[in-house]
């Protein structure tokens, strides 16, 4: 039974690549649903995370980092991020306080200035990495760029001030329905999250030239009578040389990816899993519409 005065709404998390959007999403939800990496442009889809209490349900959209695209996949990611501006009840503009305001921040701010009737929060992330005295100058610089509804400093990684952010967001939401069951934390199917967890391990373990050429697709997922979940996944790369890097010497790197991914997927599913990985070369897949569509990258 939904409580009287219950509030709900949709909130977009936007920002440059690698400012901590996925980290914030996972901190709020309390479980890993968005992958994290120190490499930019990790998130490729809008990932919905659902935060529910007795009083409010906030559906967060973790959007791809806004950047200058150099492929059809890049164009998809940019459109996915910018389309989020027009379909939400509030926007969190996440920035990294350890870095100066750059061209990427200014571009996003110019897009946010076009948004009408939607509150825009400036969320200053990574406050655990600077001295408190350094905060005010950063806030002043952003205030000169745009008039924000609220300015909230947080540490997405440590959780500092995240509860305060949630309270302030709730204040801007109206009474509304519970869109998802109270125990649901994402609207993405399990296969999507499993594929993303595998891709996260690949991002951590591969060199600079490989990460953006990687895609992961779950080809099969079945449950045995004893509860063991069998998962078969294909890792797509663009060149034969990349296939060799992913597999590693005597299969060592691929084995390590499988081991690490299995641990995270078991936490997600609450079951033991058997994970089988294959690596396939699909030349220039990031610029092929049919491949992007089959991997779930669709512009709505």
Image (spheres, grey):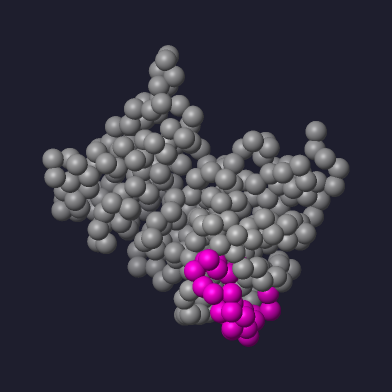
Find the magenta span and give its range.
123-148
Foreground residue, 130 or 251?
130
Q: How many marks?
A: 0
State the image quarter where residue 142 is shown. bottom right
Q: Quadrant of residue 192?
A: top left
Relative to 225, say whether 70 is above or below.
below
What is the quadrant of the N terminus in the image?
top right
Residue at x-position 67% and y-position 71%: 151
Counting from the top left corner in percent of width and height, residue 234 is at 30, 39
Q: Residue at x 36, y 40 (%)?
A: 261
Q: Please give the name of the residue rendered at 19% of the width and 51% of the height, measured from the top-left corner.
A: 245
Relative to 201, does residue 220 appear above or below in the rendering? above
Q: Residue 281 at x, y = what percent?
A: 22, 47
Image-based side of 69 in relation to 256, left or right: right
8 in relation to 271, above or below: below
**281 lies left or right of 27:** left
């Amino acid at each position: 039974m939904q409580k009287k005065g219950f509030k709900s709404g949709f909130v977009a998390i936007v920002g440059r690549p690698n400012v901590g959007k996925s980290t914030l999403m996972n901190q709020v939800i309390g479980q890993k649903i968005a992958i994290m990496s120190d490499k930019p442009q990790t998130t490729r889809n809008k990932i919905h995370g659902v935060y529910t209490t007795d009083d409010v349900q906030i559906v967060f959209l973790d959007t791809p980092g806004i950047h200058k695209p150099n492929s059809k996949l890049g164009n998809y990611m940019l459109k996915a991020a910018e389309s989020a501006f027009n379909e939400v009840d509030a926007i969190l503009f996440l920035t990294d306080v350890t870095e100066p305001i750059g061209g990427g921040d200014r571009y996003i701010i110019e897009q946010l200035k076009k948004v009408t009737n939607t509150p825009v929060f400036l969320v200053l992330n990574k406050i655990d990495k600077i001295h408190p005295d350094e905060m005010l100058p950063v806030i002043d610089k952003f205030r000169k760029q745009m008039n924000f509804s609220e300015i909230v400093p947080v540490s997405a990684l440590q959780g500092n001030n995240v509860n305060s952010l949630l309270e302030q967001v709730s204040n801007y939401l109206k009474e509304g329905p519970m869109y998802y069951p109270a125990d649901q934390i994402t609207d993405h199917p399990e296969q999507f999250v499993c594929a993303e967890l595998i891709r996260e391990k690949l991002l951590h373990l591969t060199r600079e030239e490989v990460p953006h050429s990687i895609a992961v697709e779950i080809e099969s997922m079945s449950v045995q009578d004893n509860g063991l979940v069998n998962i078969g996944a294909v890792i797509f790369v663009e060149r034969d040389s990349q296939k060799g890097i992913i597999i590693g010497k005597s299969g060592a790197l691929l084995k390590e990816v499988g081991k690490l991914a299995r641990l995270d997927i078991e936490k997600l599913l609450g079951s033991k899993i058997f994970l089988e990985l294959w690596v396939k070369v699909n030349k220039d897949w990031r610029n092929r519409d049919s491949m992007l569509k089959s991997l779930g990258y669709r512009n709505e």
